[in-house]
Amino acid sequence: MTPFSRKPPTNSSSKPCGSSELTRIRVGGLELLADLSGALHAPDYRALLVADLHFEKGSSGARRGAHLPPYDTRSTLKTLMEAIERHRPERLLALGDSFHDRAGPERLDEIDRAAIGTLGNAVDVMWITGNHDPALPASLGGRIAAEIALGPVMLRHEPRAGATWEIAGHLHPVAQITRRGRNLRRKCFIGDGGRLVMPAFGAYTGGLNVLSAPFGVLFPERRFRVWMIGGRAIHVFPSDRISP
């Protein structure tokens, strides 16, 4: 476990793209800002959190005969660098499954490998291990950990039933609502003040409906909210607005 302490406040802006009061999320006393990219900014710690980058998912599929364009890593990196530019964090915390499989780092082409290497020039990078990438090579740069403590909140890949305060990934949450007779399905953050599960950040990642059984274990009383990522803003809905 790696702990981080709170940083002194600064006058720099931490206003996210498409921001409003609804993009502010509290977990265990931390005030966090949700970004349209699916990242989460912790201004008090000058940290940017992302989950489930799934680099090299395209090349993994190609090995199994699935013909996906081999540009997911580059697209994800572009989106990530744009989020870093918006928020100007001191550190980047990646909450596991940064690669789609154990051999993902070996399949990186040189341009993408160099881009990942340059992340360390902009921010202090910490990689949390996930179920897809339980071992990461030191050649990635940055530091590797199983969990990170951000003040009172634990950051990990897989959420744990019964945990008090945590931010995790792994489940790739999506939510669906019905508006004006149309069903809208979007990636989302899901939380209840004590736990937050982040959306998958990667370009080719799918999603799991927040009303499915794995979320029921984490939010048994269904007293949660979702922050759905729209095209221009993030919209918050209570659990009773979510459609199956």
Image (cartoon, grey):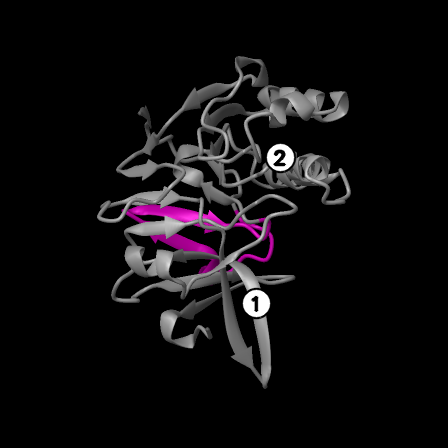
Left or right of 144? Residue 232 is right
- Residue at the bottom extreme, as displayed: 181
Q: Are marks 1 and 2 in contact (CB under 8 Å)?
A: no
Residue drawn at the location 24% of the way across and 45% of the way down:
163
Q: What residue would you read off at disc 1?
A: 185
Q: Is residue 71 above or below residue 242?
A: above
Per the model, the C-alpha gap separating discs 1 and 2 is 24 Å
Q: What residue would you read off at disc 2?
A: 55
In the rendered image, residue 26 lying in the magenta stretch gets the answer: yes
Query: Dot 2 lies on which element?
Result: loop
Dot 2 amino acid type: Phe
N-terminal-most mark, 1 or 2: 2
Q: Which residues are magenta?
A: 15-37
Is the residue marked by circle 2 packed among few (<14), some (14-19), or many (20+) residues within 10 Å?
Answer: many
Residue drawn at the location 70% of the way across and 20% of the way down:
114
Where residue 133 appears, as percent x and y from the top left, is 50, 29
Residue drawn at the location 49% of the way across and 65% of the way down:
175
